[in-house]
Amino acid sequence: MQIPENEYLALKEKEMEWAKNVIKTQEEDKRPGVQYLRQRPVTDIKHMLKTTAELYPDKIAFMTKFKKGPYVTITHKENYDNVNALGTAFIKHGLKDKRISPIGETNYQWSVSYLAAVSGTGVVVPLDKELPYNDLKHLVKEAETECVIFDKKREATFIKMMAENETPLKMLVSQERTEHEEVDGVMVYSFWKLIEEGKELIASGDRSFLDAQIDHSEMAIIIFTSGTTGMAKGIMLSHKNIASELMISPVMVDANKDDIFFSVLPIHHTYECTCDFLMPLYLGATIAHCEGLKYITKNIQEAHPTLFLAVPAILEALHKAVWKGIKAKGKEKTVRTAMKVSNFLRKLGIDITDKLFGEIKQTLGGNMKMFIVGGAAINPQILEDFQSFGIMALQGYGLSEAAPMGALNPDNKPKSNSIGLPFPGCGAMIADKGADGIGEICIKGDNIMLGYYKNPEATAEVIKDGWLYTGDLGYIDDEGYIIITGRKKNVIITKNGKNVFPEELEYQLSLFDTDMALIESMVYEEESDNKDDTLIAASIYPDWAKLKELLGEKAEDDSEVKKYLWTVVDKVNEENPGYKMIRKINLRHTELEKNTSKKIKRFVKENKMEM
């Protein structure tokens, strides 16, 4: 809804005062981790795009592939023009103030669709590309989506949905088609043709999108959690939520306009969307799209990225690949000695990692300077190995309700067992603290969601007095770093009233897995045979290739494999009191079942069985 021009100018002045205060808060924060004070104030995503295009018009914004072959580059100015054109075409086709959903692989068309939807057209509602038909249909209805922009793989899904006429859908847009076409009686618009139309409209004087008003406090984004149909909650985010994230999170790590971010994760997730898509656009940096998980190594060699945001599984795979290469050349002992030398010299401020580990760095593109990992716990040894090689590897923390960043390790003083420090101007506290100092982690800041879509009851359960109750359990150490011990809903309460955190034991399993032979584990509770006690069990999916290397022919005998796994479990049990001890192992030949966010489903029966 348009407001008078003078009122709108006053609104934007007020928003700019807020943005400048966010920057001021950073300057006043004297913690050692707050070190990179070079951010500019932005009020919203539209303002961010405009100012980036003005500051860095000719810098490359995207390295992407529309077909097999070399990367194609798109500058920040070209990207800004494409966003304006698509947004203008959206409005021309009746989508002003409507809900618009991009879906598909992480690519350029998805990115422009998101920006055009959110920067002056309406509300953007990213959809999970892994969801089955009925779940997608449910979310389209729930969010009142009128337009979907999809890739080729999902075209038939939405043509069918449109033809059924049971949803609010009015417009379908193909990311690949070059012309508007009727398919099976349904009109399918071309993403590229809409951009052409938008450019023509702007050239003829259409400023409907260029002059569109943005109130940064209003809902602009709906992110659905990865729950099943009927359980998924819509997280309402504003431009203010995102703008605050863009301004505060780069203060702890050296991310800047000269970086190339390597984009691998599904872009509909807030972690990837905010940190690996919107963040580099804000910085004036470059986004290099990976063609898919199996192309990571190939694309790294082509794009030569400097920053890689990952989930633990990806970083673990890279770590294993590096060590596999080292061992294949018979250099393990030499490299481990060099790591000790490197660690000693780095403490003295001397960095000779390029000389010692140049070959390893070349396998990661030659320019990699930083990994940031989030989404789940990771073995700290993996982070520390990369740090020894001269590549900073850090843990961060977030959840979609926080848009998503809640904490991050500073690159000048990381703690590999911690999720990091809260950002300047944001707060962290522990609620309902027990005698051990552990309680629910709560965070506060301008990044906290507006609430759950159409669900005030659920909102009231997690937001209290401005604090977001995360559902994660942990404590804050004497330097202000947050350490997670588990998830509140996953806590095992033993028959004698003791609390056991499954994630803590899973973390210890990875810590004592010195051979790196465990891929994943899930700790859970069973009733003991006499029903008088709680039995702690662990389903473990090992690296079968690694076990073959370690055990030889014995790796073909499950009983021998279990003996090996018990050597790791016994080390964990030695560290813990009796009520925390793992007393049963389920040996897995298949991965644990996961949701679309690749998080283990803790309460499905199949994950508590040998498979």
Image: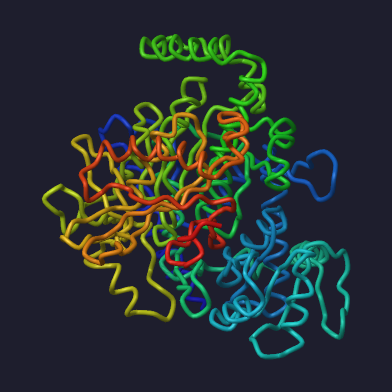
Where is residue 607 drawn, in percent x and y?
49, 60
Q: Give the image quarter of residue 422.
A: top left
Residue at screen point 23% across, 46% down? 475
Q: Give the image quarter of residue 282.
A: top right
Residue at screen point 41% across, 65% down? 11
Where is residue 192 drawn, in percent x and y?
81, 62
Where is residue 53 drawn, in percent x and y?
63, 46
Q: How many marks?
A: 0
Q: Is residue 592 above or below residue 289?
A: below
Q: Give the image quarter of residue 101.
A: bottom right
Residue at screen point 34% across, 76% down? 458
Q: Is residue 465 left or right of residue 544?
A: left
Q: Is residue 104 left or right of residue 143?
A: right
Residue at screen point 39% across, 47% down? 397
Q: Is residue 530 left or right of residue 40?
A: left
- View extreme (left): residue: 435
Q: Quadrant of the C terminus?
A: bottom right
Q: Is residue 70 above or below residue 147?
A: above
Of residue 421 and residue 417, the one placed in the foreground of this image is: 417
Of residue 249 and residue 9, the one placed in the foreground of this image is: 249
User: Do we see residue 258 in this rendering?
Assistant: no
Q: Is residue 228 left or right of residue 93?
A: left
Q: How is the image coloured?
A: rainbow
Of residue 457 and residue 192, the one placed in the foreground of this image is: 457
Where is residue 552 drawn, in percent x and y?
61, 30
User: Do we see residue 301 in this rendering?
Assistant: yes
Q: Is residue 82 above or below residue 555?
A: below
